[in-house]
Amino acid sequence: MNEQPLREPAFLVLTALAGGSMHGYALVEDVLRLSDGQVRLHTGTLYGVLDRLREAGLIVVDREEIVDSRLRRYYALTDAGIARLAAEAERMRRNASAATSRLRRLRPAEGTL
Amino acid sequence: MRRRDSPRTDGGARREPAAEALERRYRRLLAWYPRAYRAANADDMLGVALARSAPGRRWPEPGEAVNLIVSGIGERLGGTLRQPDRRDTAAVLAIAGPLLLAAGALRIMASPFLFMPAIPALETQQRMVVTAVAFAAWWTLVALAGMLRWRRAAAAGACLGLAGQVVLLVLAVSANDGALMVAYWQAAVALVTVISALGSLRSQGRPLSWRAVTALAAAPAILAGWPAVEMAFITYTPVTGTSGTISDPFWGSEGWLGDGLFAVALILTLIAIATLRPAVRRRAAVLLLPALLTTTLACWGFGGFVPGGPPIGLLTLSPFQGRDLALVPVIGVVAGFIGLQLYERLLRRREPGKPADAGLS
């Protein structure tokens, strides 16, 4: 997992958790907000992502609460998760910067971009 | 009950409240996940699924329902392969399976069927040989890719190989019972190989040394070459001008050579398994033991059948024999996987402090 770029849902979950520990539904909502309404995680997908991130040591279960007689689990970033998110954000920033730079050069020639 | 649950029906006194109906249906969908996973996560997941749903909704959104089913199946299949030891065990099977299939294909070339000049179907024989060479070469390459840790190439090769075996199975439907059963066995092994190859995609190490893989390749090769060797050992002693006795050291009361070859093949397999690191070795042994036992019994019971090809292809099986031979691979695979589950449960009981393997840590 450390060698390959994070997939979008995993990246967005880590980004959401960078704002503080969250439970499952809060994550779904925050990811929706962060992605401008583009990514609405299904429950199965969310828990698959959480399992993989936990397995990779990027997040941990912060605490558990009982709400309406149902377990609610809060997740938080680990130090490894913070480092990984920072590295991933930097990688994406470089890629975006490269794309923006090329597009700037392309713009006068194309006239439409 | 079903009609009463339908979203088209208007609410009534007997009608279950929407929230309860939705929760019940989500719980049913969560049943697609393994029990251990549900025990750890179902409550939390249910809370998310219900919170995602629009108020007053009685049925899960179709997309959410499909996602839970697919994720649950994925967890059942892939969740068990998250642990490195299990992935390495899958990597061993992803190499052993193709070797067995290659040997099965080679056996057709070694078959007495090809040495029988009385059989006129020369064209069929040539086609069989070409197919056998192609399949033997293909499965050898798949095994090689597994050894070189080209996991994706091995998985892709195994998938294509399975497709080929299925085509052979379909073609064999119109052939005799024996040929059909051979194709069925090979397709079953190919299916296990594909599952193993996919399960080993994220395996990092090389669980099998080159020496061990040589022993593992030699075991089925001995069984594959058996019929050709057998031809050299069969003696015919004429009694009268038109009749005589056949002595075959491979079968019957004089079957010491056959038993010996079985023993050698078994010892080579055990040597290969013994070289694995302990965690992988135990799992491989638990998985392979039922397959080895059932296959060995079938070999003794149906002489010349395993690992594939004539001479039994020339024979017609009785319904009883056909049923038994159809059940053997199913029993071997199911018993292997049940054995592995029981073994994993035993490990968890022995090490209660260790987190469960289904991604719950």
Image: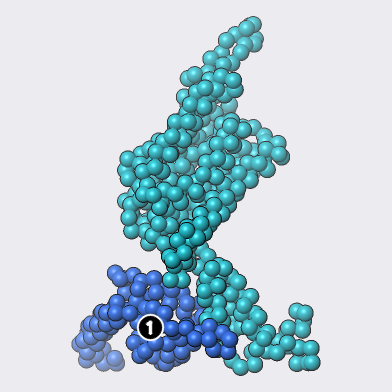
Chain colours: A blue, B cyan
Residue B85, position as x, y percentages in the image? 40, 57
Percent position of residue B78, x then y: 47, 64
Query: Quadrant of the image for the C terminus of chain B?
Result: bottom left
Task: Pick the residue in front: B99 or B161.
Answer: B99
- In the picture, measured across the screen, residue B200 lies left or right of residue B287, that is left
Q: Amino acid at mark 1?
A: Ala
Q: Residue furthest right?
A: B13
Task: Name the subunit of mark 1.
Answer: A
Residue B48 appears in the figure: no
**Residue under the point 39% across and 38% down:** B271
**Taking B320 as reference, is B112 above or below it?**
above
Residue found 27% across the figure and 79% down from its top:
A83
* Residue at 43% over, 83% down: A63
Indicate left or right for B126 with A99 as reference: right
Image quarter of the N terminus of chain B: bottom right
Q: Nearer the viewer, residue B327 or A93?
A: B327
Q: Residues within 10 Å of mark 1 (few under 14, many from 20)?
A: many
Q: In the image, is residue B350 above or below residue B358?
A: above
Q: Quadrant of residue A94?
A: bottom left
Mark 1, secondary structure of its residue: strand
Q: Which residue is mark 1?
A: A76
Front-most of residues B48 and A36: B48
Residue B143: percent from the left, percent from the top?
39, 47
Q: Look at the picture and state if A50 lies above or below B278.
A: below
x then y, percent, for residue B216:
40, 40
Left or right: B175 in relation to A26: right
Q: Is residue A78 above or below residue A30?
A: above
> B190 or B212: nearer the eye?
B212
Instruction: Work out whether residue B306 can be spotted.
Output: yes
